[in-house]
DNA sequence: TAAGAATAACTCAAGCTGAGAATAACCCCG
DNA sequence: CGGGGTTATTCTCAGCTTGAGTTATTCTTA
């Protein structure tokens, strides 16, 4: 048994097979009423032709989060103000020895939440990038361990809706309570009681603040004009906006 | 702007300055009624003489979690059944370019929760390892960015007590409700209402299950014998056992 | 044996939740 | 232009959970 000091002293990392670190991004958005994840099609082996998460090597003087943002920006062609509205947070790291056949590669995954974004091809040189509805993930094989990463990201997103104002990141600057409810319904995957949701959203301090304005028109199929809100200053929701109990996930 | 495919194709990681990946462990336990974190004193530069988290390089064929367990085991001298009772989970990764003066080192931090453990020196060759009460952290300078890592770990621990049965990992196989309450009070840092806590713990499905037995004696200062419980099969607490609202942390 | 301490159970008011319904504004179609 | 259908917003109400305080009971220590 060797303690840390001795181990470090006798350890020259350069003498070992090289390792590399990538930043990979699980970018989520809501388009066409569906939760979608950004995927790119790999051109080169390994996993050539497979779909994978956008990502790449962290550069020598680059922070991990900066690498994640850069990779995301490159794939979506997004920059400036729209990019600033995208929320990034670290998800988790993946590094089983055999996850990449080339060499030992550690992936530090980030989660990105964005309001409805344009097709990734617009402005990007990645013709083979697309938003895929998460409901279609089961029919598509992903490269490396990216399926696991996406699943972890989805669970994190569902969970963060409960106790943070994350949902406001999926809508525009101004939004209606119904817009917000659609985010929750889409990410959680089931309908919510409109009246109760409305009451709850307005009662949680700092979640939303009214703008005083309303929508120009009612909904496309009728209904009155809705009041407009913008995101409040809360960083945590208290009391939280909890998902209905899911007995199967509890045990 | 380069897309991922071109970037990968033109990128030989070996041509870049070497990077390394370490697994560092924020190991928490409750000793003497206080929440304590395991630290080791560094023998070699950089930060020689400073206290730091146990950890070390992930070996070429080693999984990250395995590396974290190994480092923890080496520092505590723990093995076998006691080690199996320690709960490990990934915390987060840290990799700002300047966090280690030697080279680019990414740290993947793990959180370990353990019932009252022996002094780390027992069975370990690390004479300079110790459990430090987290309340004493402010008076001690830590190496690298380890203070930030510890703080993130503490916040994670406090938060996970709310919605997982994590607290049962800090007590022995069999415990009383009061034992469990002490865990919550120690980690959260304030007193809880004994009666309400009792009611709540018994009402959350799967948190604890009775053994039918009681303690041999009453408490050291009186009181009846307490019933004994063991951890139940819940993985999530529903409804959660929430901390009292902390207005200052909400905004 | 008396005092003090702790477990466990109970009470009660206040707040929050789920479910359903009422009201009113607004769209589209005929 | 009028009616039917749709949606935003507000209410009601019963049931559950929470915070705070109290009570009965069992044990330890002095």
Image (cartoon, coloured by chain):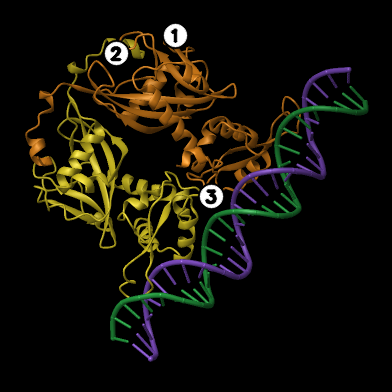
Chain colours: A orange, B yellow, C purple, D green
Q: Are marks 2 and 1 in contact (CB under 8 Å)?
A: no
Do we see residue B143 in this rendering?
no
Say which quarter of the image contains residue B5.
top left
Q: Secondary structure at mark 1?
A: loop
In x, y percent, where is residue A98? 25, 21
> Is B33 positioned to the left or the right of A74 in the image?
left
Which chain contains the residue that carries disc 2?
Answer: B
| In the image, residue B245 above or below residue A177 | below
Q: CA distance from mark 3 to mark 1?
A: 44 Å
Say which quarter of the image contains residue A1.
top left
Q: Secondary structure at mark 3?
A: loop
Which chain contains the residue that carries disc 3?
Answer: A
> Is A26 positioned to the left or the right of B203 in the image?
left
In x, y percent, where is residue D26? 41, 75
Q: CA distance from mark 2 to mark 1?
A: 16 Å
| In the image, residue C4 above or below residue B88 | below
In-front residue for pair D29/A151: D29
- Residue named by callout 3: A239
In x, y percent, where is residue B58? 19, 32
> Is A202 positioned to the left or the right of A138 in the image?
right
Which chain contains the residue that carries disc 1?
Answer: A
Residue B8 is labelled as 2
Q: Secondary structure at mark 2?
A: helix
Please check whether the numbered discs 3 and 1 fall on a single chain.
Answer: yes
Residue B53 is labelled as none
Q: Look at the image and tell me in which quarter the C terminus of chain A lies.
A: top left
- Residue named by callout 1: A127
Mark nearer the viewer, 3 or 1: 3
Badge 2: few (under 14), some or many (20 or more) residues near its Cα, within 10 Å? some
């Amino acid at each position: 048994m060797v303690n840390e000091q001795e181990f470090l002293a006798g350890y020259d990392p350069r003498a070992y097979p090289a390792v590399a670190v990538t930043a990979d991004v699980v970018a989520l958005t809501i388009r066409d009423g569906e939760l979608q994840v950004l995927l790119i099609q790999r051109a080169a082996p390994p996993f050539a032709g497979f779909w994978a998460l956008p990502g790449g090597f962290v550069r020598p003087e680059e922070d991990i989060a900066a690498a994640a943002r850069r990779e995301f920006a490159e794939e979506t062609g997004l920059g400036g103000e729209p990019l600033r509205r995208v929320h990034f947070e670290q998800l988790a790291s993946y590094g089983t020895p055999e996850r990449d056949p080339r060499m030992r590669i550690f992936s530090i995954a980030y989660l990105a939440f964005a309001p409805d974004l344009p097709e990734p091809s617009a402005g990007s040189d990645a013709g083979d990038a697309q938003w895929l509805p998460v409901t279609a993930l089961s029919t598509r094989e992903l490269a490396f361990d990216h399926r696991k990463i996406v699943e972890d990201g989805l669970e994190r997103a569902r969970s963060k809706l409960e106790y943070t104002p994350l949902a406001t990141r999926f809508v525009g600057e101004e939004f209606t309570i119904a817009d917000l409810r659609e985010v929750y319904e889409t990410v959680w995957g089931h309908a919510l009681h409109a009246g109760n949701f409305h009451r709850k959203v307005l009662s949680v301090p700092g979640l939303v603040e009214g703008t005083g304005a309303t929508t120009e028109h009612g909904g496309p199929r009728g209904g009155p004009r809705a009041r407009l809100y913008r995101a409040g200053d809360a960083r945590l929701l208290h009391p939280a906006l909890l998902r209905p109990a899911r007995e199967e996930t509890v045990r």
